[in-house]
Image (cartoon, rainbow, N blue to C red):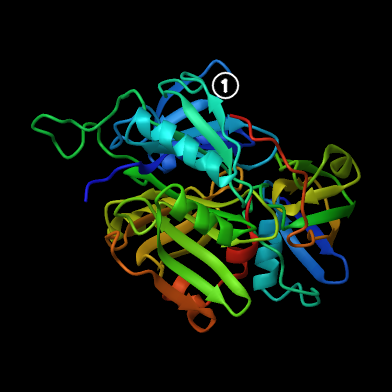
């Protein structure tokens, strides 16, 4: 099966309280590159291993969190067909013109049942740095900081996770790789639109439209260790890790950006095929599901969000 | 000589805070030393960077300066009344605090999605 429809998370727009502190964090510590600053002050960032124009947008605001997560789809025709399906499902769709973010084509946007704004787009210009494509070296510019390879996924908190599952499966053709069920119902879902164990995940939470973390992929477990050294050396606020998730099997660290938005860097995780059955976890093993070595949730996992 | 300030947590104990150190970090260290014995619950520690709101506290007395903190958790009026995120304040003298963590999952103002 080839990838069709929704390809991957493309970019996330993050609210920051202090732009200079945020830039130092995302550029020097996470290891991203600055593409440009827009006329309205938003700053556009990417990893050196991503082709498209940007994957992280920083917007100065008076409170933390995210404005939106946008997925890239395979074609303009997909945008039109998804719009029809989203409207038919009952969610209003709005239109963001090409160029509202530099380098990005027209987008469609909608709010899902957990209160988050999701957007779809089909076109992005390429920007530098990007991987070589002829006789390609392993990198075009030397990795720095934590050496993030890509913006990989986000975990969001909000109500109506059941409806999110239904919507993403029926309308956007995602599949549920893993889920956690508690005696009082569905707690959390990990959804894939391709062959990663997750492209977006949701945990049930009373307050809508909250961010748990945005995540960057690293090459290896030893890069996760190097990231941990950077976190301590530069007094970055740590949450948990290095450890491993039972869910997805990713080797991980959680920490916070200078505005309190949780970041993850991780390596590993299994390859997901669309015919794989959903992996399930119950209350008895939830500690192992989230933090495989500690085997218990820390209080912050379920309560600290932006 | 490092400059030290005394942070008194109402009904719970005292912490030693160094100049230029986030007050919450001093409270975490004091908890590690067993100096905050009478907290009604574990010290609420979240992002330590002014974003998540769980370390909210009221300054009962003393001078401090503030770093940016999320207006979703501390409004300008709150801040003027001494309500702060303890991770986002730095002591300028001895301080007296009351921990006032937000009620978890309390809905806050819904913000528009700005694109």
Q: Position of residue B111 (x, y in %)?
A: 71, 39
Left or right, A178 with reference to A303? left
> Which corner quadrant of the image does residue A75 belong to?
top left
Task: Tell me: residue B11, above or below residue B23.
Answer: below
Camera-nearest residue between A70 and B7: A70
Residue at (74%, 47%) from the top-left corner? Answer: B89
Element under label 1? Answer: loop
> Which corner quadrant of the image does residue B114 belong to?
top right
Q: Quadrant of the C terminus of chain B?
A: top right
Residue farthest toward the left in the current orientation of the protein: A135
Residue at (76%, 72%) from the top-left corner? Answer: B36
Mark yes or no: residue A148 visible: no
The residue carrying mark 1 is: A41
Q: Position of residue B95 (x, y in %)?
A: 84, 54
Task: Tell me: residue A2, above or below residue A54.
Answer: below
Camera-nearest residue between A51 and A216: A51
Residue at (43%, 49%) from the top-left corner? Answer: A153
């Amino acid at each position: 099966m080839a990838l069709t429809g929704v390809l991957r998370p493309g970019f996330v727009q993050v609210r920051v309280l202090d732009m200079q502190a945020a830039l130092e964090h995302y550029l020097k510590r996470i290891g991203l590159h600055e593409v440009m600053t827009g006329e309205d002050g938003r700053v556009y960032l990417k990893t050196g291993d991503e082709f498209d124009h940007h994957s992280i947008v920083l917007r100065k605001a008076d409170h933390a969190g995210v404005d939106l997560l946008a997925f890239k789809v395979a074609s303009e025709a997909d945008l039109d067909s998804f719009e029809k399906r989203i409207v038919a499902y009952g969610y209003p769709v709005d239109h963001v013109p090409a160029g509202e973010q530099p380098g990005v084509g027209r987008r469609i946007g909608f709010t899902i049942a957990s209160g988050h704004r999701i957007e779809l787009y089909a076109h992005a210009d390429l920007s530098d740095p990007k991987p070589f494509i002829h006789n390609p070296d392993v990198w075009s510019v030397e990795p720095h900081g934590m050496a993030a390879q890509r913006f990989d996924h986000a975990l969001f908190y909000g109500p109506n996770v059941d409806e999110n599952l239904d919507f993403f499966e029926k309308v956007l053709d995602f599949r549920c790789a893993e889920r956690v069920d508690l005696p009082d119902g569905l707690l959390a879902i990990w959804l894939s639109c391709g062959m990663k164990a997750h492209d977006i995940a949701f945990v049930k939470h009373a307050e809508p439209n909250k961010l748990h973390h945005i995540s960057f992929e690293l090459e290896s477990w030893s890069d996760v260790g190097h990231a941990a050294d950077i976190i301590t050396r530069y007094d970055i606020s740590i949450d948990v890790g290095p450890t491993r998730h039972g869910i997805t099997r990713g080797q991980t660290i959680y920490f916070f950006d200078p505005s309190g938005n949780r970041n993850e860097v991780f390596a590993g995780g299994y390859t997901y095929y669309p015919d794989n059955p959903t992996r399930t976890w119950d209350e008895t093993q939830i500690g192992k599901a989230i933090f495989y070595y500690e085997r218990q949730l820390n209080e912050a996992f379920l309560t600290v969000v932006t | 000589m490092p400059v030290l300030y005394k942070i008194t947590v109402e009904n719970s104990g005292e912490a030693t805070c160094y100049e230029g150190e986030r007050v919450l970090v001093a409270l975490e260290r004091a908890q590690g030393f067993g100096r905050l014995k009478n907290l009604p619950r574990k010290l609420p520690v979240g992002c330590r960077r002014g974003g998540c709101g769980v370390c909210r506290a009221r300054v009962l007395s003393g001078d401090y300066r503030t770093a940016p903190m999320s207006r979703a958790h501390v409004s300008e009026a709150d801040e003027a009344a001494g309500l702060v995120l303890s991770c986002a304040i730095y002591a300028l003298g001895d301080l007296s605090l009351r921990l006032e963590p937000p009620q978890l999952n309390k809905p806050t103002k819904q913000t528009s999605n700005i694109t």
